Image: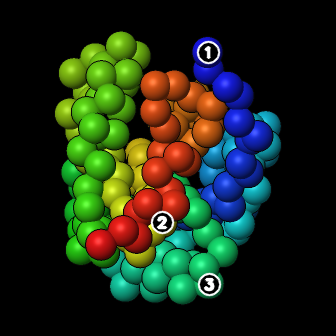
Amino acid sequence: MNKRMKFISLNIGIITISDTRSEENDKSGKVLYDAIIDSKHNVFNKIIVPDNIDQIRECIISWIKTNNVDVIISTGGTGLTGKDITPEAVEPLLEKKIDGFSSLFHQISSKKIGTSTIQSRALAGICNNVFIFCIPGSPSACSDAWNEILKYQLDINHKPCNLVEIMPRLSET
């Protein structure tokens, strides 16, 4: 018999990475914000950061240092153009990559956009016991990542396993 556990509300930070977005036209950030709130989690912070490796890293590191964030989700900068530098900014910070996130995201994405999914470099990993997910900048990609993957993995009652239940063990040595 599966015993339901008390829902654990996580603190989730949202970073929109773009030189062209503002609070008024940040549709992807809004999709994530609304989804997080609807799922009964907390938005730790929501910020727009330009396409700049140092500023992206600075934001992530400063949030992690607060010890008040459990998950960071970035949107934007995962494509192939010269300004798409999110993976280059984030990967060196990761202690462990969650390769399955990218694989599953591409599987889900291919059902909607076919082979165009190869242009995304979505990634995920762990930095200092904080989960980091980097997803493409389209509202549809944000919706897919949340509704098909993250809302389940960030729910203690998702079975057979989820990321919340392993959070206390991330710092094991």
Instruction: Identify the mark at residue 27; answer none if there is no mark.
Output: none
Kindly identify which residue carries mark 1: 1
Say whether residue 46 is visible: no
Where is residue 96 shown, x and y percent of the image? 26, 61
At 26% across and 56% down in the image, what residue appears?
A: 97
Judge from the rendering whether residue 56 lies leftward or rightward of residue 83; answer left or right.
right
Q: Going from the N terminus, do you reach mark 3 or mark 2 first?
A: 3
Q: Amino acid at mark 1?
A: Met
Kindly identify which residue carries mark 3: 66
Real-space Cα separation, disc 1 to disc 2, in angstroms:
31 Å
Mark 1 element type: loop
The image quadrant where one finds the C terminus is bottom left
Q: How is the image coloured?
A: rainbow
**Which of the pair 102/96 is nearer the observer?**
96
Real-space Cα separation, disc 1 to disc 3, in angstroms:
38 Å
Bin the neighbour count of mark 1 within 10 Å (Cα to Cα): few under 14, some 14-19, many 20 and up.
few
Q: Going from the N terminus, do you reach mark 1 or mark 3 first?
A: 1
Q: Amino acid at mark 3?
A: Thr
